[in-house]
Image: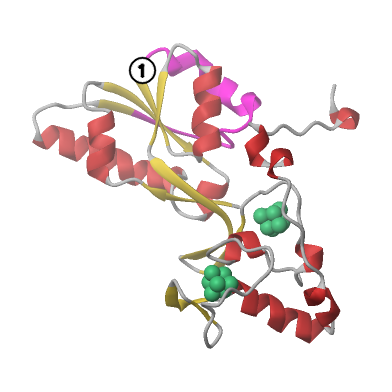
Amino acid sequence: MIVANRKPLEEILEMIRPYKKILLLGCNECVTVCAAGGQREVGVLASELRLSRAKDGNEIEIREHTLERQCDHEYIDQIRPFVGDYEIVLSMACGAGVQYVAETCRSKLVVPAVDTTFLGVTMEQGVWSERCQGCGNCILDKTGGICPIARCAKSLLNGPCGGSSGGKCEIDKEVDCGWQLIIDRLQELGQMDRYEEIIPVKDWTTARDGGPRKRMREDLRL
Ligand code: SF4
Ligand code: SF4
């Protein structure tokens, strides 16, 4: 899932400072799971904003609404009947959701209330950890199912570097060395021969550096 964090209240207040009618839009998917922008967080943020603005003698009207997804136009269409009643949309979705709402409701200013951070997993309640950077050419088959791009601090395709010590990364003694994890896993799997293979330099032109990526499945298109 996509993991995000809510922005600090002061930053959000600054973004909406000139406006009095706000549509506060949550998303029921990833940002709900990571407790950054679901229905509950919409309620909490709306209360904080109302209180802060009332304290400043500058009251606002906020409509709280949570969509099933903000990255899908069929759900965004649900706000069309009333989005025009508001001066600004404050979106609690990931960056993709914020942008798609802005593209779909072109006459509205849409601003983010969360910082989108990474593709990750839920380790335990309240703890999320990065696993993938969406590189567009997955090499997990070569690395025992552990991603060196997301889990090595230098995103080395062949490692570890000279800074690995006692299984920890040189950037922080609390952080596991991604390449040590890969070696340990390949040993467990009896696949250390894979470690001998040099992973070639990635062709980043097929990944992010080729511009915004698009995926199309002709068999699913209408
Ligand atoms: S190699 Fe890593 S970053 Fe690339 S798709 Fe696979 S898990 Fe994601
Ligand atoms: S110590 Fe390990 S995780 Fe850290 S940069 Fe070097 S190889 Fe990558």
Q: Residue furthest right?
A: 219
Task: Name the residue located 65 percent from the left edge and 72 percent from the top edge.
Answer: 159
Residue holding disc 1: 86
Asked if the magenta segment contains residue 93, the reply would be no
Q: Amino acid at mark 1?
A: Tyr
Color theme of the render: secondary structure
Q: Is mark 1 within 8 Å of ligand 1?
A: no
Task: Name the residue located 24 percent from the left edge and 35 percent from the top edge.
Answer: 13
Circle 1 SS class: loop
Q: Which quadrant of the figure has residue 183?
A: bottom right
Q: Position of residue 128 (x, y in %)?
A: 51, 63
Residue 119 vertical position relative to residue 14 in the rendered view, above or below: below
Task: Name the residue located 24 percent from the left edge and 21 percent from the top edge.
Answer: 20
Number of numbered callouts drawn: 1
Q: Which residues are magenta?
A: 63-87
Label 1 neighbour load within 10 Å: few <14, some 14-19, many 20+: some
Rendered-image quadrant of the C terminus: top right
Q: Position of residue 219 (x, y in %)?
A: 91, 31
Asked if the magenta segment contains residue 65, the reply would be yes
Q: Position of residue 19 (x, y in %)?
A: 25, 21
27 sits left or right of 179 in the view: left
74 sits left or right of 42 in the view: right
In terms of depth relative to the viewer, which is nearer, 221 or 84? 221
Task: Name the residue located 63 percent from the left edge and 59 percent from the top edge.
Answer: 149
Q: Quadrant of ligand 1?
A: bottom right
In terms of depth relative to the viewer, which is nearer, 195 or 150? 195
